[in-house]
Image (tube, rainbow, N blue to C red):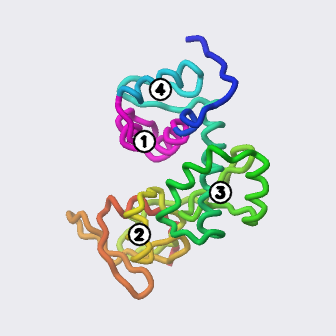
């Protein structure tokens, strides 16, 4: 299929490429149903847009397997991710917004930021390496370094770790995690993992809480050997 050239990437294309990047990072590929759920648009709209993205050389789409970014699409997606995560840092660090309320605002900001604005923003923020949720901020070339982590749900019973990042940014989850103290930088210990039980008991500071394994899986930790 011949690849068309585009003179400018629209905010809609940026939004789709960012969405596909995030889903691909979590699931290996972005299924159409996941894109529909994430962007809250009609299935037909997603199908048409994905076809357009494939024609323009931003993605590849394999039936029943999902959508993946090409190198060209990934470069643009990382630029958008960089703008998004720096915007979140601005909103939390400078404007003092809660970490559960910045995602949607950052989505609106990211499409209006110029390279010059982004440079000044990064300098004002003292070149942060992660967003407020602990996820890495790509540099100008799209590169980033990231610590080896594993899902909290995979720590063994009695195992300890330091929370590095939260990979699911739904507001209700972030409010809940903050209430429990499950934030980047916090030390956490698995108290109990009943064999057939879907719940995991965790300890943060002096408090203990029960989490479903699904919730524990979106919290990534660096294991601390004892």
Discs 4, 2 touching: Cβ within 8 Å = no
> What distance separates the C-alpha of mark 3 from that of mark 2?
21 Å
Q: Quadrant of residue 64?
A: top left
Q: Position of residue 186 (x, y in %)?
A: 51, 76
Discs 1, 4 touching: Cβ within 8 Å = no
Residue extending furthest top? 2
Q: Which residues are magenta?
A: 16-43
> What distance separates the C-alpha of mark 3 from that of mark 1?
21 Å
The answer to whether residue 34 is magenta is: yes
Within 10 Å of disc 2 (Cα), the crowding (few <14, some 14-19, many 20+) is: some
Residue with the mark numbered 3: 86
What secondary structure prevails in the magenta region? helix
Label at residue 39: 1
> What distance separates the C-alpha of mark 4 from that of mark 3?
27 Å
> What distance separates the C-alpha of mark 1 from that of mark 4?
12 Å
Q: Quadrant of residue 120?
A: bottom right
| In the image: residue 214, left or right of residue 54 | left
- Local secondary structure at mark 4: helix
Within 10 Å of disc 4 (Cα), the crowding (few <14, some 14-19, many 20+) is: some
Upstream in sequence: badge 1 or badge 4? 1
Within 10 Å of disc 1 (Cα), the crowding (few <14, some 14-19, many 20+) is: few
Q: Position of residue 6 (x, y in %)?
A: 66, 22
Label at residue 49: 4
Upstream in sequence: badge 4 or badge 3? 4
Discs 3, 1 touching: Cβ within 8 Å = no
Residue at left offset 65%, top offset 57%: 86
Residue with the mark numbered 2: 175
Within 10 Å of disc 3 (Cα), the crowding (few <14, some 14-19, many 20+) is: many
Residue at left offset 76%, top offset 64%: 124
């Amino acid at each position: 299929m011949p690849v068309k050239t585009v003179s400018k990437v629209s905010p809609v294309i940026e939004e789709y490429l960012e969405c596909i990047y995030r889903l691909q990072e979590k699931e290996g590929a972005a299924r159409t149903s996941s894109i529909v759920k994430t962007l809250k648009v009609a299935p037909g709209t997603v199908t048409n847009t994905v076809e357009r993205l494939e024609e323009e050389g931003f993605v590849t789409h394999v039936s029943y397997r999902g959508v993946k970014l090409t190198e060209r699409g990934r470069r643009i997606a990382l630029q958008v991710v960089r703008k998004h995560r720096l915007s979140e840092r601005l909103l939390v660090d400078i404007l003092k917004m809660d970490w559960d309320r910045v995602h949607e605002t950052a989505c609106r900001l990211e499409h209006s930021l110029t390279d010059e604005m982004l440079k000044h923003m990064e300098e004002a923020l003292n070149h942060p390496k992660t967003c407020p949720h602990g996820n890495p901020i790509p540099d100008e070339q799209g590169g980033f370094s990231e610590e080896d982590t594993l899902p909290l749900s995979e720590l063994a019973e009695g195992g300890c770790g330091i929370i590095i990042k939260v990979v699911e940014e739904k507001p209700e989850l972030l409010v809940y995690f903050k209430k429990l103290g499950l934030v980047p930088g916090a030390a956490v210990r698995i108290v109990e993992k009943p064999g057939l039980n879907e719940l995991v008991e965790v300890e943060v500071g002096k408090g203990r809480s029960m989490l479903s394994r699904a919730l524990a899986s979106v919290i990534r930790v660096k294991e601390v050997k004892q």
